[in-house]
């Protein structure tokens, strides 16, 4: 049923594990520091706090979707925190999710098992582990949550048109990964989103705003979580 949603061009040279160190953020939840990119995966002011603010409160909760099923695409799966928060919200609000994510540099299992998100969010550790072990094909993590984790770059996937209700854009920063924040990448995502679909990202850099606008998005700046002044929410306009 879902096999035609994403056609994957596997480029194994990009499937390289990142060397990351667990760091305790100020809200008591873990983030990681990437030795490859020299950046934290989540805010050191509060990892769960930041993801809830940007991707759940301003993103997921702002989407209107039909048939009690939400189609999500994440750029930069990383620790899996955004997926776990989405899972938890779906569980508490009785809807189903098809969750697709790309991650060119997967986090190693030894690090995943050390993250404290399942304990803090009161979610089964096995659910969290299963998310990181998902194949590139959509697989049932639970009866209401399907996930496909693809160990490739955004540039190396083909996305079905008009499919996604929401996109979490959570790549490393535009300064570190400028190729991920290009007009061509946002155009690809724009075409893959439904009309009225929402994209949220932590970055509010001028080049990001211009790239989103060039791709066709309507954008707005919103107040950020602690430690961040602003972030962006973008929408694919209605017909």
Image (cartoon, rainbow, N blue to C red):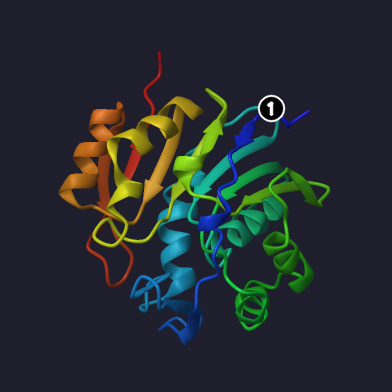
The residue sitting at 19% across, 38% down in the picture is 210
Q: Is residue 228 above or below residue 14?
A: below
Residue at numbered disc 1: 4
> Which quadrant is home to the N terminus?
top right
Q: Badge 1: few (under 14), some or many (20 or more) residues near its Cα, within 10 Å? A: few
Residue in the foreground of this view, choosing between 216 and 29? 216
Secondary structure under the numbered disc 1 in the rendered image: loop
Q: Is residue 162 above or below residue 120?
A: above
**In the image, residue 161 lies at what x, y percent?**
53, 23
Does any portion of residue 11 appear in the rendered image?
yes
Does any portion of residue 232 appear in the rendered image?
no
- Say which quarter of the image contains residue 133: bottom right
- Say which quarter of the image contains residue 98: top right
Q: Is residue 107 above or below residue 212?
A: below
**In the image, residue 217 lies at what x, y percent?**
31, 30
Q: How many marks?
A: 1
The residue sitting at 22% across, 63% down in the picture is 229
Residue in the foreground of this view, choosing between 56 and 208? 208
Instruction: From the viewer's perspective, tell me whether residue 24 is left or right of residue 100.
Output: left
Instruction: From the viewer's perspective, tell me whether residue 218 is left or right of residue 236.
Output: left
Residue extending farthest to the top is 239
Residue extending farthest to the right is 143
> Which quadrant is home to the C terminus?
top left
Instruction: From the viewer's perspective, tell me whether residue 197 is left or right of residue 164.
Output: left
Residue in the foreground of this view, choosing between 107 and 91? 107
Residue extending farthest to the left is 206
**In the image, residue 35 lies at what x, y percent?**
40, 78
**In the image, residue 131 lies at what x, y percent?**
70, 60
The residue sitting at 22% across, 42% down in the picture is 209
């Amino acid at each position: 049923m879902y096999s035609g949603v994403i056609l994957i061009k596997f480029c194994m040279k990009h499937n390289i594990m990142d060397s990351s160190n667990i760091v305790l953020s100020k809200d008591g939840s873990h983030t990681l520091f990437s030795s490859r990119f020299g950046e934290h995966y989540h805010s050191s002011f509060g990892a769960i706090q930041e993801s809830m603010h940007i991707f759940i409160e301003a993103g997921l909760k702002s989407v209107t979707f039909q048939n009690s099923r939400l189609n999500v695409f994440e750029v930069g799966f990383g620790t899996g925190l955004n997926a776990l928060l989405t899972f938890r919200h779906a569980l508490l609000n009785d809807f189903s999710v098809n969750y697709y994510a790309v991650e060119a540099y997967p986090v190693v299992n030894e690090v995943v098992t050390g993250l404290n998100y399942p304990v803090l969010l009161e979610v089964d550790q096995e659910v969290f582990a299963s998310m990181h072990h998902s194949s590139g094909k959509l697989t049932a993590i639970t009866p209401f949550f399907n996930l496909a984790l693809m160990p490739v770059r955004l540039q190396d996937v083909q996305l079905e048109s008009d499919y996604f209700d929401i996109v979490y854009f959570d790549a490393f920063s535009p300064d570190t990964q400028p190729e991920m924040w290009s007009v061509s990448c946002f155009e690809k995502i724009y075409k893959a989103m439904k009309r009225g679909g929402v994209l949220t990202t932590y970055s509010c850099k001028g080049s990001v705003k211009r790239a989103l606008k060039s791709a066709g998005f309507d954008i707005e700046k919103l107040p950020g979580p602690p430690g961040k002044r602003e972030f962006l929410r973008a929408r694919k306009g209605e017909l």
